[in-house]
Amino acid sequence: MITYTYRIAQYLSFIYFKIFHRFEIIGIENIPESGAFVLASNHLSFLDPPALGCKINRNLHYFARDSLFVGPLGFLIRRLNSIPVNRGQLDLGTLKRTLGVLKSGEPLLVFPEGTRSIDGNLSQAKKGIGLLIDKAKCPVIPARIQGSFEILGKGMIFPRLGRKLIITYGTMITYKELTSSCSSGNRREEISELVLEAIRKL
């Protein structure tokens, strides 16, 4: 169930991006109204999670560093569907919780690269997303975010107002489509690469 806190955060995020970054969204019709899926996107900035989720009318879940889950900030990000993760690694406890989210029919945002880009370009995919998709056997929706590196890239403290932000949501890729050409020995690594390639094509 979507909480009031989450709805308010979505609304305020959208207003900010629309006013200050000429926010443009392409392909929102590709987001299904029900059912679990992994939303897989490139990662350029701390702005990416709210930007990717603010117009999705679903209870989207996110990963966040476990060190953030303390005090008032920890209370807030829990209310915003954040899942604690240790240094970006998908450990057994995190994997179980994440699979529980998907099993319940809710979507999950994942950054295949694992961390923010240092130069605005796509880097290599981590095998964690391949493991997750292979375990959950759920579909994937690729997404591409453009402009957030220029707005608040790695090392920047203040956002550059006026820079345009664009998000493109691709069409859904089923688990069967992802794995049809994968070898049994390297299936998870190949899934990760196929997801990253789908993002690259947007």
Image (cartoon, grey):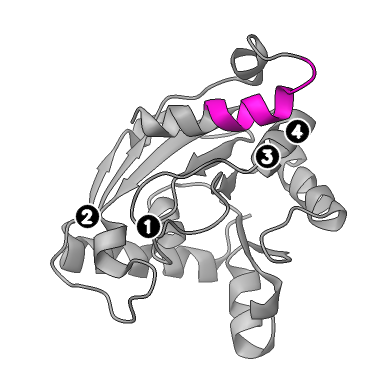
Residue type marked 3: Lys
Q: What is the quadrant of the C terminus in the image? A: top left
Q: Residue at x 56, y 48 (%)?
A: 109
For label 3, the residue is 127
Query: Quick one: label 2, few (<14), some, or many (20+) residues within 10 Å?
Result: some
**Whole-number angstrom distance, CA of label 1 to CA of label 3:** 25 Å
Image height of 54 relative to 141, above or below: below
User: Rounded to the nearest whole Å, what is the CA distance between mark 4 and mark 3?
Assistant: 14 Å
Closer to the camera in the image, 176 or 35: 176
Q: Main secondary structure of the magenta part?
A: helix
Residue at image x 38%, y 50%?
55
Badge 3 element: loop
Residue 186: image location, x then y, percent: 74, 23
- Tag 2: residue type? Phe
Decide: is 122 above or below 18: above
| Three-letter code, disc 4 | Ala
Q: Are marks 1 and 4 in contact (CB under 8 Å)?
A: no
Residue 161 appears in the picture as rendered = yes
Q: Are marks 4 and 3 in contact (CB under 8 Å)?
A: no
SS category of the residue bearing label 4: helix
Q: Please report whichever mark, 3 or 2, sits nearer to the chain's N-terminal start.
A: 2
Going from N to C along the chain, the mark reached first, 1 or 4, is: 1
- Residues packed near mark 1 inside 10 Å, few (<14), some (14 to 19) or many (20 plus): many
Taking the magenta stretch, the answer to whether it contains residue 135 is no
Label 3 – label 2 distance at C-alpha: 31 Å
Q: Which region of the structure is painted magenta?
A: 184-194
The secondary structure type at the circle numbered 2 is loop
| Residues marked 2 and 1 touching at CB (< 8 Å) | yes
